[in-house]
Image (cartoon, grey):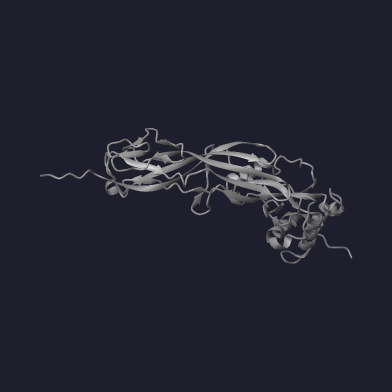
Amino acid sequence: MRRATMPRAVAASALALAVAAMPSTATAGGGRGGGEKGGYEGSAEGSANDRVIRAQTKIKVTTDGGSRSSTGTLTPSDSNWTPPACWYEPSFSPKEIETAVKLWRNIDGFVLPGVGDFVGDMLDHRYKEGHPYKDYNLDKQGEGMFWAAVKNPKRKDDPEANSCDKQPFWVDEGEPPNEPLAVSPQVLAEYAYDELPVPDTEIEMAPTGKSTVNLPTWIWLDKAKFKKLSVTASLPGTGLSATTTAEPVSLHIEPGTADAQTYPASGECAINEDGSIGAPYAKGKADQTPPCGVSYLRSSGSDGPYPLRATVTWKISWTSTNGEGGDLPDGTFGTTQDVTVQEIQSVNR
């Protein structure tokens, strides 16, 4: 019996609905794929916006020198640069593509009558009937993978996240993909940039509590907290790995009012040789100028405390398993602390 076909007028919308409605666990199928270097578990995702079959990234990260608690995300100093929003990586074996198509057919009637077979026919046209792949490339099981678009989990809402709009394509094992957005050591390094667990910039100050007009407030950062840290991003089964390292280089102070003087005058406190920034206040230093600090020229008054912002700049570099490496844009992360400033109290006799 001839299968009923769906009118072309509703074809695109039907496919979009089907992709959006299909559970992600159902579209992932098959056993492990890949060759001697290892395997991958297929995990398909659909987009109702552009009807592209994507995958969940399999990039793994490990951290050295940082803690995942109370951390922030770096802001690149170059406003024209961001970590990648999407890329292509090896995602599906031939068996996984075959199983995914069969699962598509199982949604028949779930969204629109006949939509399961319609979507399955479209996928079979590409992956089974020779346009351009025949029989899902099952004869090449273990000799390569279908590479699919993935989105950076932290940047799914970025407009650029949809720029990887190709359907899964075949790449023979050991052959470099002919695709500029394919995962690479630099992509892994840039992905790791987003994963750097920089600590909150909570500065130490003396005096604590309240500052006094025209008297220096000493500011410093603990060398044990602000130290070099790194994140390694790797793609299992490929041999691709990159390590991105962040090293604190300076602290910038913004007093929160124009009626203030910073030390140094630029407000930029350099890092010391031992990794600390500034110097703790100690008894007997009252008449000294702090290497890092601020003097407020007016009390904060009834308008509330001054919002002192402290921002640490981190120098970023990367290395990889294939010898590639270099620098990435410096990153900054800052926090704001309230500072109450009082007038000097005098006693009249």
Q: Is residue 245 left or right of residue 311?
A: right
Residue 75, how many percent across, how many down?
Answer: 52, 43
Q: Nearer the viewer, residue 58 or 78?
A: 58
Q: Nearer the viewer, residue 117 or 88?
A: 88
Whether residue 8 is situated above or below residue 251 in the rendered picture: below
Q: Taking the image as drawn, is residue 140 in sight?
A: yes
Figure disc tally: 0
Q: Taking the image as drawn, is residue 161 in sight?
A: no
Residue 316, how many percent across, how many down?
Answer: 56, 39
Whether residue 264 is situated above or below residue 308 in the rendered picture: above
Q: Is residue 263 left or right of residue 149?
A: left
Residue 70, how many percent across, how many down?
Answer: 48, 53
Q: Residue 8 falls in which quadrant of the image? A: bottom right
Residue 289, how many percent across, how many down?
Answer: 32, 35
Q: Residue 185 falls in which quadrant of the image? A: top right
Is the N terminus in the top left, top right, bottom left or bottom right quadrant? bottom right
Q: Which residue appears at 69% of the width and 56% of the height?
A: 45
Q: Which residue appears at 35% of the width and 36% of the height?
A: 262
Q: Nearer the viewer, residue 186 or 78?
A: 186
Q: Which residue appears at 43% of the width and 45% of the height?
A: 222
Q: Residue furthest right?
A: 1
Is the C terminus in the top left, top right, bottom left or bottom right quadrant? top left
Q: Is residue 346 left or right of residue 58?
A: left
